Amino acid sequence: MIINRQKILFIPFPFSALNYQKEVAPTSFTPFNYTNGIYKPPLLLILDIVKPVQVNMYNRRYFIKTTGAAGISSILAGQPLLRAMFQDKYKMKPLRNNVGIFTERGGTIAWLISETGLVVVDSQFPDQANHLLDEMKKQSDRKIDLLINTHHHGDHSGGNIAFKGFAKKVVAHENSYAHQKRVAEERGGLEGQLLPDTTYKTGVWREKVGEEVMALHYFGPAHTNGDSFVHFENANIVHTGDLLFNRRAPFVDKTAGANISNWQEVMEKGYETFDDDTLFVFGHSGNGYEITGKRADLKAFQNYLRKVIEFVKKGKARGKTLEDLASATEIPGAPEWKGGQSRPVNAAWVELFGEG
Ligand SMILES: [Zn+2]
Ligand SMILES: [Zn+2]
């Protein structure tokens, strides 16, 4: 049974305002966030820091109003646990069969918390991973059976280190492992990292965890060359990692072997492998769009990728330069994928016409 803090307190925390879904530079943990390939300058980052504070103030005001308690600050000051509750910015949302999602900052995390097994898929950053780990410890004394990385990017694997000593096994595609290791070495060492200890190369990697069965599926290069669909088979929930950006222009990591043409094929294979009952968890979503969805969303994203290729092909034929095309903010035929299109357009150009 998942305990939902919101229900216990009967306080409508405006968590959704903090449901950050940011893409972060793959080789960096610097505070400079990329959003659809656009660098977010430090001034805007200050707003990221201010926003949670504003929401916490709202929570505290609400608490005062609903309880009528006077001197709430002094109560909070004397109650570390209570204070921690009011400072939480994250959200644990159950989906079904003891599987749910954790959202705070970075790519969505999926979890399984049951009496017979614990699984974590992706880890955001160390602070966020610790928030999740604390919640899991409240509900179970078990070690985490599997920590799985959908791929290597820092907003999905940067928090692995928080699970050191708590996760029995860390699993990812072998290319994800290679990128995680490379990035860590480029950053000066492996000490601050927890790398996968179990990898697979092709097809499906599968393991039973209590009453659930976890399966990783690899269909070739897409967002990187090491992305897995991660399937909770009994719950029939799939974490897509960054294989699907829901109505938001995707990050395409060419330096890590991304391939837009094959990405369309990966969407097709995913569509064929899973079914209408499958609930999908996406790494990121556009403003106002859900972080979970259905099989039809794979087709819609496949269409977006196809339209990117078409847009670049037709644009060049009409004499447009790469620079012209990369400045687009939406793609004809797939206008829901808002945001800077420079990364997908650049990737499509390289695949169609080479670096030149
Ligand atoms: Zn991501
Ligand atoms: Zn990614």
Image: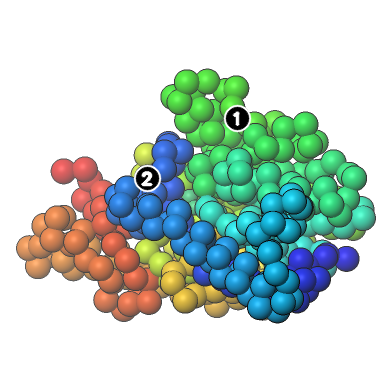
Residue lying at the far right of the rendered structure: 115
Q: Which residue is mark 2?
A: 32
Residue 147 visible, this orientation:
yes
Which residue appears at 92% of the width and 55% of the height?
A: 115
Spot occupied by residue 11 in the image (x, y as percentages of width and height): 70, 75
Spot occupied by residue 320 in the image (x, y as percentages of width and height): 10, 62
Q: Give the crowd class for mark 2: few <14, some 14-19, many >=20 residues within 10 Å.
A: some
Q: Which residue is mark 1?
A: 193
Q: What mark, if any, has residue 99 been given in the picture?
A: none
Q: Quadrant of the C terminus?
A: top left
* Secondary structure of the residue carrying numbered label 1: loop
Tag 1: amino acid: Gln
Foreground residue, 219 or 235?
A: 235
Gap between marks 1 and 2, in whole Å? 20 Å
Tag 2: amino acid: Phe
**Mark nearer the N terminus (1 vs 2):** 2
Colouring of the image: rainbow
Q: Give the crowd class for mark 1: few <14, some 14-19, many >=20 residues within 10 Å.
A: some
Foreground residue, 8 or 306?
A: 8
Above/below status of 222 relative to 301:
above
Q: Quadrant of residue 113?
A: bottom right
Spot occupied by residue 128 in the image (x, y as percentages of width and height): 62, 48
Which residue appears at 46% of the width and 38% of the height?
A: 29
* Secondary structure of the residue carrying numbered label 2: loop
Which residue appears at 88% of the width and 66% of the height?
A: 1
Above/below status of 141 relative to 344:
above
Q: Is residue 110 left or right of residue 266?
A: right
